[in-house]
Amino acid sequence: MTLTVELPNDIAQHENAAREALEAVVLEGVRTNAISRPDGRKLLGMERLEFMDFLHANGVPATTYGVEDLIQDIQTSDHLRAQGLLP
């Protein structure tokens, strides 16, 4: 699929205007969860660690592990421990 975006002249004159626009779309998409991190990485053609550095440099958390995830992990480990599957 091809996506065409019309850029204002002052931005279109940047040497890497298309790349800058793509990076901005990916950053906002990842920030709002409209684009998954693996899809964002694929769109930009970056390796995993390079993409994580890119996100960090632009103020976007590299992961989405939050308080709810921690609570779920604690509950899972408590459950496994009660079953004798964890020490």
Image (cartoon, rainbow, N blue to C red):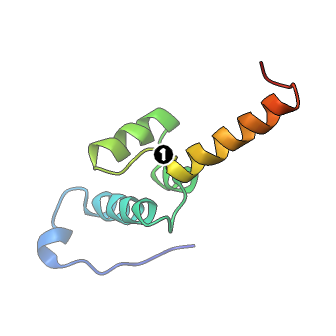
Compared across the picture, whether 69 is left or right of 87 comes to left
Residue at 60% across, 46% down: 71
Which element is circle 1 on? Answer: loop
Going 28% across and 43% down the picture, which residue do you hit?
Answer: 57
Q: Residue at x 79, y 23 (%)?
A: 86
- Amino acid residing under circle 1: Thr
Quadrant location, the N terminus = bottom right
Q: Residue at x 73, y 35 (%)?
A: 78
- Pinpoint residue 56: horizontal percent, then vertical percent: 33, 42
- Please state the horizontal and vertical placement of residue 11, each as a whole percent of the image: 17, 69
Q: Image check: 80 left or right of 30?
A: right
Q: Nearer the viewer, residue 68 or 2?
A: 68
In the image, residue 55 above or below residue 34? above
- Viewer-side residue, 10 vs 40: 40
| Rendered location of residue 73, percent (x, y) | 65, 41
Q: Which residue is mark 1?
A: 63
